Every structure is written in C-alpha cells, then in structure tokens.
Image (cartoon, rainbow, N blue to C red):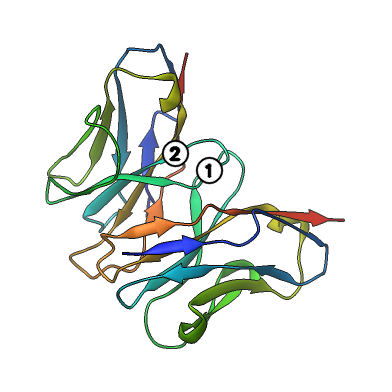
C-alpha cells in the first residue's frame, strides 16, 4: 500500500526566498512520485514526476525535486519564490501501473511581497 | 491537442436528486479516474475505468457509480445526493496501454448540493 505525508499544511515565504515543500511517502513497491499544483478553482497541473532513472527531477516553473529512497522523501524546491507560485501543492505516490495513486493532504504556499 | 475536458463546470442540485458528470480524456489516453475534492482537502479516489470496466474503487458508497464508453469518455453518477457530496469532482486520464506515466487532470466540476 502507498501513502503520502506532507509536512506543513501552510508554508509562507518571502518573494525571492527558497521554497521547500516536504513530502514523505510509504510504499510497498518501487514508487512513482508526483507533485501537482492547484490554483484556486482550478484542476491539478503536473509540476514534475519521478518514475525511474535520475533521482533529481526538474519540472515546470523552476521547480525541482529529489527522490531520496533512504529517507523516503520527495521534497519540492524552488530557489527563488515568485508571487505567482502562491497555490496549493499536492504530492502523490503511485505504483508503476497507476492503479494505486494517492495524494497527500496538500500544502498551501503563500508568497509574501 | 485537447487535454481532459469535464462538463459541466458548475452545477447546483437539491438533496436527494441524482447527478451525472462527464469527462473526455486526453487524446491517446485509455484510462479515466474520478476524484472528489472537498473544500480544503486533497483529492480522494473514487474509482478508475479501463476498457469500459471499473478497475479499482476507493472508499465510496454505491451511490457513486460510473461508466466508460468505447471512445474512452466517462460519466460519474451520484444518486440520492447528500449535502456532504458538495465538492469539486476531478477527472483524470492516463494511458495504461502505453505504460503509466502519471495522470492528466481536468479543471473539475464544482457540485453544490443544497
């Protein structure tokens, strides 16, 4: 079975500061890992994903995440926050076939001018 | 190339009524999953359809049912609506036939039950 824990339901950063959103997972099989972003009243947009291969993955809008098997983590980072990054971020874990796909509870990111 | 399309975008229903939500998957995708997202919560998995059959189901009552058509589009039906069914319903598509690499989500249908 898979599960995801996102530490910190609300994160605030200053514009230009580092963004770090935490995600830890539990999986009985090699996981596929995802970060999605959701803007108000919209659907989910894929930021980045890890399936196999390189453990540091780069996504859209300057975000990246590193799969650390030993720490069962997949934290999302961005070197410099922009006002447009303010949104809800969801980490998700899946099996390789996608039939077990689970979201975390989400982290709301606020960017302070 | 159109992504995932959901209709309607918003609707209001009365408690006890029935509702049907529709989803057209991204071109090339053969699998459709439905999620319920209550306000301030993460999406909760309802069920997944592949080859016109329910492949997997989350912890939702039988009031929630679905269908997938030969063109891969899908419907979500909810009977005997409760106030607690008010949520954003998200459809997500993927490709199993070409190997799973993640879901593409639609913009959702906002259902309000009064």
Q: Which residue is mark 1?
A: B41
In three-dimensional space, the C-alpha distance between marks 2 and 1, rounded to whole angstroms, equals: 14 Å
What percent of the width, then of the height, locates residue B30? 21, 55
> Label 1: chain?
B
Question: On the picture, is A76 further left or further right than A110?
Answer: left
Which corner quadrant of the image does residue B13 belong to? Answer: top left
Q: Residues within 10 Å of mark 2 (few under 14, many from 20)?
A: many
In the depicted structure, whether residue B67 falls above or below residue B55: above
Instruction: Say what secondary structure mark 2 lies in.
Output: loop
- Left or right: A22 as drawn, with respect to A15: left
The quadrant of the image that shows the N terminus of chain B is bottom left
> Foreground: A42 or B86?
B86
For image coordinates 59% across by 76% down, the residue present is A64
Q: Is residue A37 left or right of residue B19?
A: right
Question: Residue A30: x, y in percent?
Answer: 33, 78
Q: Give percent across and percent down for residue B57.
A: 23, 46
Could one spot residue B113 in this view of the protein?
Answer: yes
Q: Would you identify the image quadrant in which residue A23 lies?
A: bottom right
Q: Categorize mark 1 by other alpha carbons within 10 Å: few (<14), some (14-19), many (20+).
A: few
Give the structural element (helix, strand or loop) at label 1. loop
Q: Which chain is disc 2 placed on?
A: B
The residue that mark 2 highlights is B108
């Amino acid at each position: 079975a898979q599960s995801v824990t996102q530490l910190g339901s609300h994160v605030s950063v200053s514009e230009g500061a580092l963004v770090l959103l935490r995600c830890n997972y539990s999986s009985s099989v090699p996981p596929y890992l995802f970060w999605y972003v959701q803007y108000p009243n919209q659907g989910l947009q894929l930021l980045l994903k890890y399936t196999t291969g390189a453990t540091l993955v780069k996504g859209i809008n300057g975000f990246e995440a590193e799969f650390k098997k030993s720490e069962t983590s997949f934290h999302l980072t961005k070197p410099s926050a922009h006002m447009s990054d303010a949104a809800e971020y969801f980490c998700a874990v899946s099996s390789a076939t996608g039939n077990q796909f689970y979201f975390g509870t989400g982290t709301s990111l606020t960017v302070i001018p | 190339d159109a992504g995932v399309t959901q209709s309607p975008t918003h609707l209001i229903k009365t408690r006890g009524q029935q509702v049907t939500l529709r989803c057209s998957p991204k071109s090339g995708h053969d699998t459709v999953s439905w999620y319920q997202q209550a306000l301030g919560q993460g999406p909760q998995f309802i069920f997944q359809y592949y080859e016109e059959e329910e492949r997997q189901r989350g912890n939702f009552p039988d009031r929630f049912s679905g269908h997938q058509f030969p063109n891969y589009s899908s419907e979500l039906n909810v009977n005997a609506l409760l106030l607690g069914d008010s949520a954003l319903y998200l459809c997500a598509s993927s490709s199993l036939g070409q190997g799973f690499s993640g879901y593409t989500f639609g913009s959702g249908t906002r259902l309000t039950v009064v």
